[in-house]
Amino acid sequence: MKVVIFGAKGQLGRDLTKILSQKGGVEVFAFGKDQVDITDKKRVSEILNEIKPNFIFNAAAWNDVDGAENPANSEKVFQLNAFAPFHISLVANKIGSKFINVSTDYVFDGEKRSPYEENDEPNPLSIYALSKLLGELLVKTFCQRYIIVRSGGLYGIGGSPMFGRTRGNFPEKVLDALKSGNQMKVVYDVFSAPTYTQDLARKMIEITFEGFEGLVHIMQNGIISWFEFARLIAKHSGFSDRLIQPVSRRELETIAKRPMFSVLRNSILEKCGKNDMMEIEPALCKYLKERGII
């Protein structure tokens, strides 16, 4: 069995590569963005036609939500998040591969105030979210065999200093502030279910190998504000949380609009009896153990 992974040096891509490489009988071809720009149609076509993988995992994307609002970046944002997955879909059809593409919780506007299910109507608030939704629609329409995975609030070892990441994930930003003694303002009225990429990668691979197809939500189980999540990071890292200051989202304005409530319900996994995603706190602890912090 052959598997191709694009975006293999990012947080999710690293965990997909690690888990798949440990499986017997699986040949893994992992490409970071320095090796393959997925917007390079010719290069992507050559690679996929040469390898002819059973599965193609795309963990490459434009993830700078605020940067996507800059008109100078618009073309690149849509190329990466929408048109590259569209092109991969067409090649996957020709070579008989299943395509697994990653989308986001941000396709929703957060007005529901309860966990979003797969059949809820999207309403993106930002350019980033719109580009990811367009990617979903193109894959759904043109790919013959696909899985679209919605998740959000991702953090993993690939976003830590262990891999030289200077722009770290949320837990790393909290840890940096706590270690340096700097006050950190965190929103108390924005809710998510921050998701550990190792747990996400495990479940993605499991359902892929079991033959699942279609759109699916995969997120940690639970609901938490980013302020409370930051306090959990402090608690389990042995720091006081006095430096973590709660603020409203109006006090911390961002360039891009974000949903106040972007929690996904793993409805399809629940119906299949396969929702064994970890709760938020145990998943965080597992990450901190992997980092060697606890």
Image (tube, rainbow, N blue to C red):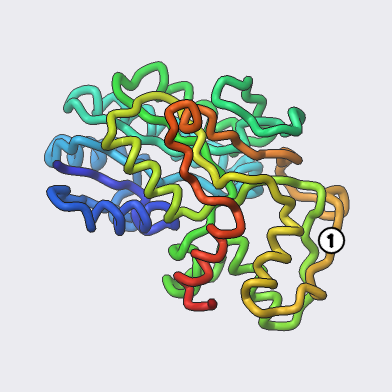
Q: What residue type is labelled 1?
A: Pro
Horizontal side of 166 relative to 54 (left or right) equals right
Q: Is residue 33 at least partly visible in the picture?
A: no
Q: Quadrant of the N terminus?
A: top left
Horizontal side of 255 relative to 248 (left or right) equals left
Q: Nearer the viewer, residue 21 or 13?
A: 21
Q: Mark 1 points at which residue?
A: 246
Residue 264 location, x and y as percent?
60, 36
x 42%, y 55%: residue: 198
Residue 176 against residue 188 in the figure, above or below: below
Residue 228 against residue 70 in the figure, above or below: below
Q: Nearer the viewer, residue 135 or 275?
A: 275
Horizontal side of 96 relative to 82 (left or right) equals left
Residue 283 location, x and y as percent?
53, 58
x 43%, y 36%: residue: 274
Q: What element carries label 1?
A: strand
x 48%, y 73%: residue: 291
Residue 150 location, x and y as percent?
51, 36
x 68%, y 45%: residue: 223
Q: Which of 32 and 160 is in front in this view?
A: 160
Dot 1: few (<14), some (14–19), or many (≥20) neighbours within 10 Å? Answer: some
Q: In which quarter of the image is the C terminus?
A: bottom right
Q: Is residue 259 at least partly visible in the picture?
A: yes
Q: Which of 283 and 225 is in front in this view?
A: 283
- What is the quadrant of residue 209 in the picture? top left
